[in-house]
Amino acid sequence: MKTIKEADWKILRELRASAIDRYCEKLLQEASSHANQKNVMYKTHSCVRLEFFNRRRQHHAGFGDLRRSNALERLAFMKAKGIITTAEMARFSEETQERVSRFEKL
C-alpha cells in the first residue's frame, strides 16, 4: 500500500501549515546566526545565499507537491527535521508511524 489512510491524510494536511512555519522559523534562525558571526560581509552573504538555496531544495522535497502517494516521504522529512512534534506524530495511526520509522532507517 503506497498511500496513507484517509484519516492520516487529513491530519497531515492539517499539520502542514504549522510544520512549514516551524521549518521557516528554523531557517531564519540559522540565517540570523550566520549574520551575527564576525565574518566579512561578502562571506556571510555567500553562506546565507548557499544555505537558502539548499533549504529551498529541501523545502520542495519536504513540502512541495503533497499527495497521498508521497505523504509518507513528506511526513518522514518533517519528522527527521524536527518540525513535527512527538504529540503531533502520536496523532497518526500506528501503521503510519511504523512506516515513517522505516523511512528514517533508510
Image: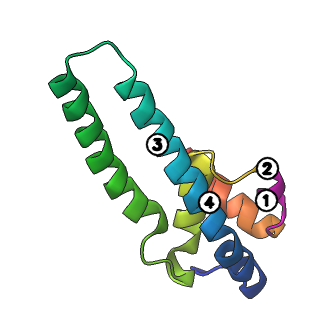
Q: Please, what secondary structure does the residue beneath circle 4 have?
A: helix
C-alpha distance separating marks 1 and 4: 10 Å
Q: Nearer the viewer, residue 94 or 22?
A: 22
* Front disc: 3 or 2: 3
Q: Which residue is mark 1?
A: 88
Q: Are marks 1 and 2 in contact (CB under 8 Å)?
A: yes
Label 1: element kind: helix
- In the image, is residue 106 part of the stretch drawn in magenta? no
Give the Cα distance between marks 3 and 2: 23 Å
Q: Quadrant of residue 97?
A: bottom right
Is residue 95 found left or right of 77 in the rendered image? right
Say which element carries label 2: helix
Residue corresponding to mark 2: 86
Q: Which mark is residue 19?
A: 4
> Of callouts 3 and 4, which one flags the residue occurring earlier in the amino acid sequence?
4
In primary-sequence order, the first of circles 1 and 3 is 3
Residue at 58% over, 58% down:
21
Residue at the outermost left position: 42
What crowding class fits label 1: few (fewer than 14 Cα within 10 Å), some (14-19), or many (20 or more)?
A: few
Residue for point 47% across, 61% down: 62
Look at the picture and state if 3 lies above or below 59: below
Marks 3 and 4: which is nearer the front?
3
Q: Main secondary structure of the magenta part?
A: helix
Number of other residues with Cα within 10 Å of mark 2, as a class: few under 14, some 14 to 19, many 20 or more: few
Describe the colour scheme in one phrase. Answer: rainbow
| CB-based contact (under 8 Å), mark 2 and mark 4 | no
Q: Amino acid at mark 1?
A: Glu
The residue indicated by pointer 3 is 28
Residue that appears at 68% across and 80% down? 9
- Front-lying residue, 30 or 69: 30
The range drawn in magenta is 86-92
